[in-house]
Image: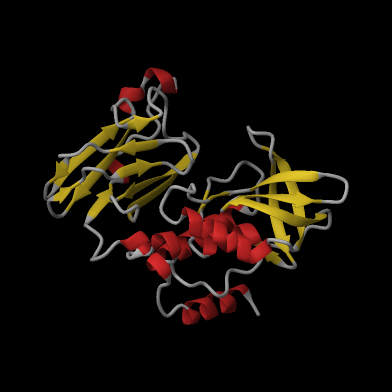
Amino acid sequence: MTRIGRWVLLGLLITGCGVDGVVDVTAGPDTAGALPGDVIPGTVTRINDGDSLVVETGSAEIEVRLMGINAPESDECLGQEAEQRLVELVEGQEVGLADMGQDQFDRTLAYLWLGDLLVNLEQVGGGFAIATTPVEGDARGETLLDAEAEAYEMGRGMWSETVCGASGPSPSVEIVGASSSFDPQGPDDEVLGQEWVALASEERVDLGGWTIRDESSVHRCHLPGGLSIGPREERTVASTDPCWDPGDSSVWNNGGDMALLLDTSGRVVARHRYSG
């Protein structure tokens, strides 16, 4: 079956939502490109979360971080479901690793194949992870971005309006890319006050307890109680604002990133991706 055909089949198979509004994905995107000839064979012995696991190769036990994706943390909306999805896919299974280097925690960054299925792409296509801005030379990164856009448009997983117990239509708040300042001139740490994300709304919305985040697992802005936005009003949140955890650092990557606005349930209300 072609990749397009499989995506069509996936859309036909999605007829509702599962527990906590998680879309029941029974198929996924096809592999991104041909299976590399130099994959390392091994067996998955442990799932740590929705984007990391342990593979036993026979000669070593490898801590693996799936390349090009970022699943929600275990205490975030859909975090446990993303982990469970990875358990269902590969726990105890024979897989192939394409080693792409190491992350800051000395884990092996890898693309992971189950037969001819690219697991990284399966997690993103099902809405259980976001894609991250591809590093230079990562040919599969654009495919992951396309899969994320498709999952977003289809409302799968973390992109569902009913995810994590959310109810009712999503509020009409948007991230205004044209009014945001993700890469101000000058050294990042010296222009934090000039780095901001802009929000706009068609109606009055209480933003208290909402979250703004980037594509990483690090930067989170928890908006304070009592904060609201009115109709046709634009509000900016700068990287110097006290809502950020951690604070006093640049939030938005100059080479490309994604801004997400989440309501109190963890539902994604607005999404904006930009390139460098």
Residue 246 is situated, as x and y percent measured from the top left of the image, at 41, 28
The quarter of the displayed image where residue 269 is located: bottom left
Residue at x 37%, y 28% (from the top left corner): 184
Q: Quadrant of the N terminus?
A: bottom right
Q: Is 88 drawn above or below residue 111 in the view shown?
A: below
165 to the left or right of 37? left
52 to the left or right of 177? right
Residue 117 is situated, as x and y percent measured from the top left of the image, at 68, 66
9, 50: nearer the viewer: 50
Instruction: Name the colour scheme.
Output: secondary structure
Total numbered labels: 0
134 to the left or right of 257? right
Q: Residue furthest top?
A: 190
Residue at x 57%, y 70% (from the top left corner): 28
Residue 173 is situated, as x and y percent measured from the top left of the image, at 23, 52
Q: Is residue 174 visible to the viewer in this orientation of the structure? A: yes
Residue 179 is situated, as x and y percent measured from the top left of the image, at 27, 40
Q: Residue furthest right?
A: 59
50, 181: nearer the viewer: 50
Q: Is 191 drawn above or below residue 268 in the view shown?
A: above
Residue at x 69%, y 34% (from the top left corner): 106
Residue at x 42%, y 24% (from the top left corner): 249
Q: Is residue 155 visible to the viewer in this orientation of the structure? A: no
